[in-house]
Image (tube, coloured by chain):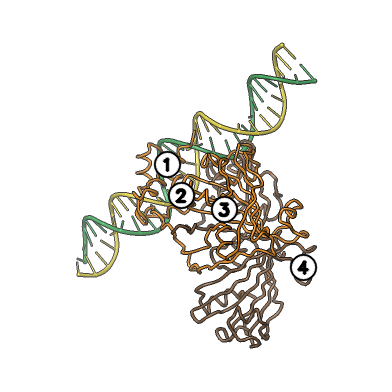
Chain colours: A brown, B orange, C green, D yellow
Amino acid sequence: MIPKFEAIKQAISEEIEQGHWQEHEQVPSENALAERFACSRMTARRALTELVEQGVLVRSQGLGTFVAPFKSQGSMMAIRNIAEEISERGHQHSAQLLLLKPVAAEAEVAIALAVPAGSTIFRSSLLHLENGQPVQLEDRYVNPALVPDYLEQPFSSQTPHEYLSQVAPLTQAHHLIEAVAPSEVQQRLLSLEGPEPCLQICRRTWSSQGVVSYARLLHPGSRFRLGGHLMVESTSR
Amino acid sequence: MIPKFEAIKQAISEEIEQGHWQEHEQVPSENALAERFACSRMTARRALTELVEQGVLVRSQGLGTFVAPFKSQGSMMAIRNIAEEISERGHQHSAQLLLLKPVAAEAEVAIALAVPAGSTIFRSSLLHLENGQPVQLEDRYVNPALVPDYLEQPFSSQTPHEYLSQVAPLTQAHHLIEAVAPSEVQQRLLSLEGPEPCLQICRRTWSSQGVVSYARLLHPGSRFRLGGHLMVESTSR
DNA sequence: ACAGCAAGGTTGTATATACAAGAATATACC
DNA sequence: GGTATATTCTTGTATATACAACCTTGCTGT
């Protein structure tokens, strides 16, 4: 039995989802929602409050509650795959497999994976879409010694990240985040109008055996931002 | 007049702060708090709920509410100031103070700092240079209630971040990282040739009292990358 | 015409109450 | 002794109500 305030949250999210309630548009007042959903004002209020915390709505006293400008937001803390993040937002995730084959390791990738330059490694390339709109171009290199069956995976229902988590449990990761201008090929794949700034995350993941994979994740700056709670590591200690 | 639930939050925070309530120790139940603070259970509950959201407490149904381990998730990304980072690389850090004055809070900033829109807050703007080359444009808004002497600081030898760490020890931070195109003014300040992609970090920092400051840190994509080790968080939660 | 006030709608705070759900402990029973 | 069962304490959900704070709008009096 899902709680009533959850049901209301979902209903409101859907209205926004389907464009019935546009950005910056005022959503029904607490009293109006209470009547519509046959609940008390406090219950409707809770739904609104939590959506405000999630960044879906904004509100100000005396004025009303409004649909917040939309931007997808990724979490930095956990190493999670994009599919989970998207479905948690209640959106639809899909992916196109662009490439999946063995390649010779270039210098940069060889260093990242800690394998000899020129040795054979596995490469995959996927385009992740949120509600049909490209949000991530995933270019991944995998250490074949640790994941020999990588090329046999379909990657239709399961993302590479999910598969790797199963066969080689991750213990550590190193991230490098930067703002870059996309190449023309990348622009086309991400359906960008021009050379709009992109957020690139380079991620090396380790299992107990060594470096498992090296991934470059490219996100359009206008459709993706990375957010998270971080505890302060005090500099004095 | 500060709301009652805020007062209760502060009282609880103080108990934890001063070590009266240790980590993992159970805090008084909602009913007990209601009696102690002469309020209804719902009000005490709200205080607890918000502290849970802030990560100060953890709770579970049927068991009780407990003081959260202070650094629960291991090492995330340290919040360090740019000056330290640069000098650690063996380079020379310098900074230009561009602006330091009280301003009226715009909507976005007011929300970030949790102050009424239009109220007076402190703003500072600095340009950080590494070996004479601009690497960070720091635009910072500070809550005057928590840091009343902010405008009296020189910020020549000490960065705003260092000063704030002293006067209001940080307990938590929220980060938002995105790739953006710099405005023309920002291009000029950062000595950029054209609209090169920039990495923007929006950082809200909290002390036990509330939101201390909101900073927008803009870095040229070609001269700055963000890196860090991340421990994998177990997927079970 | 215009300043000022009043009214109504909105979110924000606070309270009292009731019952549901989860977890530990005590108790009764076999 | 071991296993159910009941009790009790905890948090979680839901409602009804009251008033405060804030904003907009429209009206009113000069």
Between marks 4 and 1, how big is the CA–CA gap? 52 Å
Q: Position of residue A85 (x, y in %)?
A: 60, 64
Residue occupied by mark 3: A7
Q: Amino acid at mark 2?
A: Leu
Residue occupied by mark 4: A187
Residue occupied by mark 2: B51
Between marks 2 and 4, how big is the CA–CA gap? 43 Å
Q: Amino acid at mark 4?
A: Gln
Q: Amino acid at mark 1?
A: Ile
Q: Position of residue A44 (x, y in %)?
A: 56, 45
Q: Nearer the viewer, mark 3 or mark 4?
A: 4
Give the residue at the far bottom of this rendering. A119
Label 2 SS: helix
Residue occupied by mark 1: B8
Label ID, residue A163: none
Q: Position of residue A142 (x, y in %)?
A: 61, 81
